Image: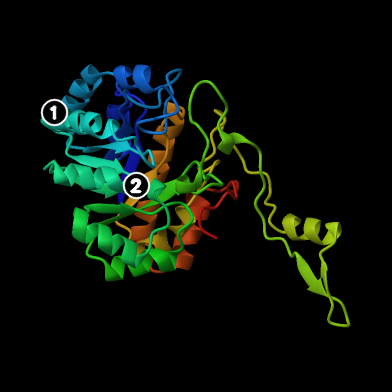
Amino acid sequence: MKIVAGLGSIDEYRRFADAGADEFFCGYVPYSWAKKYGTVLPLNRREVLCYNVQLGAFSELEILSELVKKYGKPVHLTFNSLYYIPEQYPEIGGIISRCMELGFLSYIIADPALMVYLREKGVNCEIHLSGECGEVNGRMVAAFGKKIGLKRVIFHRKNTFEDMRAVAEKCEIPEREAFVLNEMCQFTGAFCNSLHCDEMGYLCRVPYELGTVKTVKTDGQGLEKTASASDKMASVSQLETPDPVYDPTGYLCGETGCGLCALYQLKQAGITHLKLVGRGNYTDYMEKDIRNLRNALRMLGESGDEAEFKLKLKSGIFPGGCSGNCYYR
């Protein structure tokens, strides 16, 4: 399985490549687009200017294309909005055509209409079905694969191993990608109405708690009643984990979402690429994430079964305990 890491700036490319990343993804939002459409009609759903989340100048793409030629680690550009207004499609087509001239041949796209538009206009780029597109199942992917010619399908955060395995077995899509580290958002991207911009806080940053709560129980006479507050508290408390141990820099692998212990199951499900989210994250933390994921993949290759792999993972990466924020339960 290959590591696909998020880029927030071109300065991160060499560091992340040296750390062990195999591929990258990043956004590109020209200033002309931001000036014309603002934050309410986004190109990439990451309309952030105050820190490094994506590229904003064509000259940066020119530099990045030279880095790709030197290091051989491809970069996929993201167009993650769920829809666009009619006048935007020709503009996006023009942006992609210019990017392809620099050697950027693969694009992560969420809007089905944009995929159709590109094919009708003869834009022969590789298309990765974005995890922002929504629920992924065999028939959906088969339809996209036949009409659009998908190179890769990216599963969103809420897919099960069974879902992924079914798609891998039934659809002729050569590459399948799944989330593995960071940003375990409580929303599915296709149903998120938050704006990711400088002007307001992200909805996914609002504190929340996920847990299994028993909502109904039956008394001795067969009557249903709502669970009491004490029942609910007991149910939630069972999910609590010991306080994890941070390193001296304040880093903890998988603090905001972790799927390392699921690597064995992801491999069995046919996953070929692992998405390491990190655009806008601290560069030092991202570098450590990549090295930890590379180390975990080495442990996976040396393990005979899932139990052995988890023992290696616990002693090698989480000796002081993990965050408990697991993608896949």
Question: In the rendered structure, which amino acid carries the disc numbered 2?
Answer: Ser
Look at label 1 and name its amino acid: Leu
**Disc marking residue 9:** none
- In the image, farthest residue toward the front: 86
Query: Which residue is the site of mark 1?
Result: 102
Q: Is residue 110 above or below residue 98?
A: below
Q: Is residue 14 visible?
A: yes
State the image quarter where residue 207 is shown. top right
Look at the image and name its color scheme: rainbow
Q: Residue at x 13, y 28 (%)?
A: 102
Residue 316 against residue 83 in the figure, above or below: below
Distance from label 1 to label 2 (Cα)? Answer: 22 Å
Q: Would you name the residue on which mark 2 appears?
A: 130
Task: Determine whether the residue tagged by mark 2 lies in a helix, strand or loop.
Answer: loop
Q: Nearer the viewer, mark 1 or mark 2?
A: 2
Asked which quadrant contains residue 174, the reply is bottom left
Q: Position of residue 273 (x, y in %)?
A: 31, 51
Mark closest to the chain's N terminus, 1 or 2? 1
